[in-house]
Image (tube, rainbow, N blue to C red):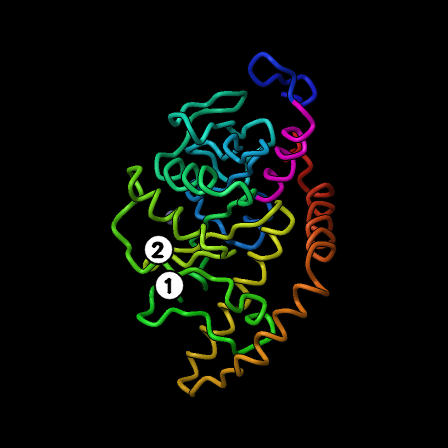
Amino acid sequence: MSLKAVETGAKPMDEVERQGRIDLAAMFRIAVRYNWHEGIANHFSLAISDDGKRFLMNPQGRHWSRIRASNLLVLDADGAADVIGQGAGKADPTAWHIHSKIHAGNPKARCVLHTHMFYATTLACLKDYRLQMIDQNATRFYNRIAYDENFNGMALDDGEGRRIGGTVEKDKSVLFMANHGVAVVAGNVAQAFDENYYLERACKVQVLALSTGQPLHVLSDEVAAKTCEQWQREFSTDAAQDHFNEMKAILDRHEPDYKD
Ligand SMILES: [Zn+2]
């Protein structure tokens, strides 16, 4: 189905939704290329209304390598887990509870990426799972990570979703979920992709450093804070967009059907 011909409810699809579908579909394909995916499980979402409550999300049961823009569901964070616009299938219950609560409570949380990507999840399984400021990539996340220490089974009810969503509201961009995985929250898909990329790289370095059995050489708070500020100033919006655009150019060449 061509996106140009699709309608959402009674209204033609607006430009925000049309572009959002393409960007989020690209994000799924990119996640497969980096092996951040878990087959048909895990979920990404993107707010398409100003209040953040209307959002796109992947349908349950579709492998990320096959997700197309037109497959994405339109959901309303104030409603039930019903699809309110064009899409293919229904929402995964855990995805609904986590993403609807994050979007409903935080309009700035435009794009939410939840994965069990290997190195971040490996850290989340350790008793001390804080991201240590031991390399330049890690400093990007200095004081920007929230830690949820209370894994309580799958998020199959509103309470669990609200608890997880509440943790993200504390002005953080990353949520480490103990014994589970991570969520990255950003202002758009490009920023979320770039954050997710550097987060997994930083986690990989920490896991590898720990595997040597030698003590970590942790940076001072002063240097970590300064380097984080440099990240924000020099490598924020434009660099993230460039990075994402390059990945989309690779998709355009090898698997352009993500845009359909
Ligand atoms: Zn999960």
Q: Residues within 10 Å of mark 2 (few under 14, many from 20)?
A: many
Side (left or right) of 149 relative to 207: left
Marks 1 & 2, CB-CB < 8 Å contact: yes
Give the residue drawn at x 68%, y 70%. Answer: 230
Residue 249 to residue 81: above or below = below
Q: Position of residue 234 (x, y in %)?
A: 73, 65
Say whether mark 2 is within 8 Å of ligand 1. Answer: yes
Label count reads 2
Residue shown at 74% from the left, 55% from the top: 238
Of residues 84 and 197, the one nearer the viewer is: 84
Q: Using the rendered view, name the quadrant where residue 239 is placed.
A: bottom right
- Of 238 and 254, which appears nearest the observer? 238
| x then y, percent, for residue 44 | 50, 42
Query: Which residue shows up at 53% across the image and 69% down it?
Result: 142
Residue 130 horizontal/vertical position (percent)? 41, 70
Left or right of 255? Residue 113 is left
Q: Quadrant of the N terminus?
A: top right
Task: Check the image and name the residue furthest to the left.
Answer: 152
| Circle nearer the N terminus (1, 2) | 1
Q: Is residue 84 magenta?
A: no
Q: Which mark is residue 180?
A: 2
Question: Gap in Å between the C-alphas at discs 1 and 2?
Answer: 7 Å
Q: Give the magenta part as a residue range.
A: 14-27
Given the image, on which type of amino acid does mark 1 rest?
Ala
Query: Helix, strand, or loop for circle 2?
Result: loop
Query: What residue is at 58 percent from the left and 74 percent from the top?
Result: 225
Question: Label 1's element?
Answer: helix
Image quadrant where one finds the C terminus: top right
State the image coordinates of residue 194 (x, y, percent, origin top left).
62, 56
* Amino acid type of the residue tagged 2 in the rendering: His
| Residue tagged 1 | 124
